[in-house]
Amino acid sequence: MSNHGCNLHFELDPCAHRVFLPAEGNPIPEGPHITGKLILSLAQPMRIGSIDVQLRGFIKRRWGSSERPKTLTKSCTESVIFQRSWQLMRTPVFQSRIYAPGRHEVILDLALGSGEHMRESVDGVEGYSISYLLIGTVTRKLASDLTCHESIKVYRSYAPSEWYSFATVHALDNEWPGKIRYSITYPATQIPFGSDLCPRIQLYPLTEGLQIESITIEVVETHHFAPNPSLDGGFLNRITRSRVICRKEVSSSKDPDILVHELDGGYEVAPLLPLPTSIHDCAQTIQSSHFDITHNVTVTIRIINTDGHISSVRASTPVVIYMHNVNITQLKASSLYSRHIIPPVPVTCMLTCTIEMFFAMWAYAIRLRMGRYSRAEPNTEL
């Protein structure tokens, strides 16, 4: 903030704008820190009494209507849910320190502890938000204070080394008597924000003549608003609202881009489902006493019966979408991601491709030696 030749602002480290709290029940020796500098630029000498930094958390909620409990009104309330202060410099009472003109840097290393009283940031959700501001204050003698602020995101996440513990395959096996037997396998139910989901679906018709009309995979995000007090002193009903954040539909006969192959009279499908990369289109999973965000993957299988009518079966599996402090492009290129987020290519398929490539190269080499192809124009016969 500039005031008559004075400027106060933060210069935080690149990763300091995103604070990652340790997982619940998994304390770490050293909690998260906010690091960087508080910069004070002066055009003339100034008497300063103190320099303080404060991290403040805000919650904003819209009240529901007692007549229409599933709606949100325009009236909004804001309250402070977290506040912590750090004193960087303070002079004795009735004294001050004179700062010369120029640039003054105050090193920041703000420890947040275990973060047990902090809630995760919530953005992009209509009717509810949690935000944090880092506020710097410089008190001056016989003048108004200087202030500046910086937005901070707070998430609860896990270290990359802990992703291995999430890579437990989750399988759902079920049978519709007389119709179909199906198996849905997920490489992991803990999914990094912005990555890909790739369920493996195996289908086995139990009656001759049944056909797979389509398979639809949807990731459904549900917002649960806790009951809020109304204006007349009563309590409103709990508000639940859902949205589909990503969706893909495949067909065993209509979609040539999806790998579908018959195995013992059945089908196997492994579609790639990219999650949204914007916090306005997808939020991380949150569980609290006031507001919850949950995610479920719903698979709907539509079957064409022998008489032509269509039946459907639906299976839903809860998943956790969590924030991370890793570049998603680097994450997708890592062996950890390819091993645990995307199902590995079956060994039989890899061997088949390798053998086919070997024989193709061997045949081309023989033709080249026999003079069937020209080196200058390999696609033209002599």
Image: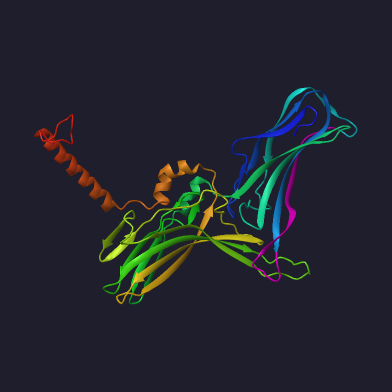
- Among all residues in the image, which is located at the extreme right? 94
Looking at the picture, tell me which residue is in the foreground, 243 or 342: 243
* Highlighted range, magenta: 64-91
User: Is 70 covered by the magenta stretch?
Assistant: yes
Q: Is residue 362 left or right of residue 38?
A: left
Residue 69, position in %: x, y? Answer: 67, 69
Q: Main secondary structure of the magenta part?
A: strand
Residue 350, position in %: x, y? Answer: 27, 49
Residue 86, position in %: x, y? Answer: 75, 40
- Among all residues in the image, which is located at the extreme left? 370
Looking at the picture, tell me which residue is in the foreground, 210 or 139: 210
- Reply above or below: 39 against 120: above
Quadrant housing the N terminus: top right
Q: Residue at x 59, y 55 (%)?
A: 25
Q: Is residue 294 left or right of residue 116?
A: left
User: Is 338 covered by the magenta stretch?
Assistant: no
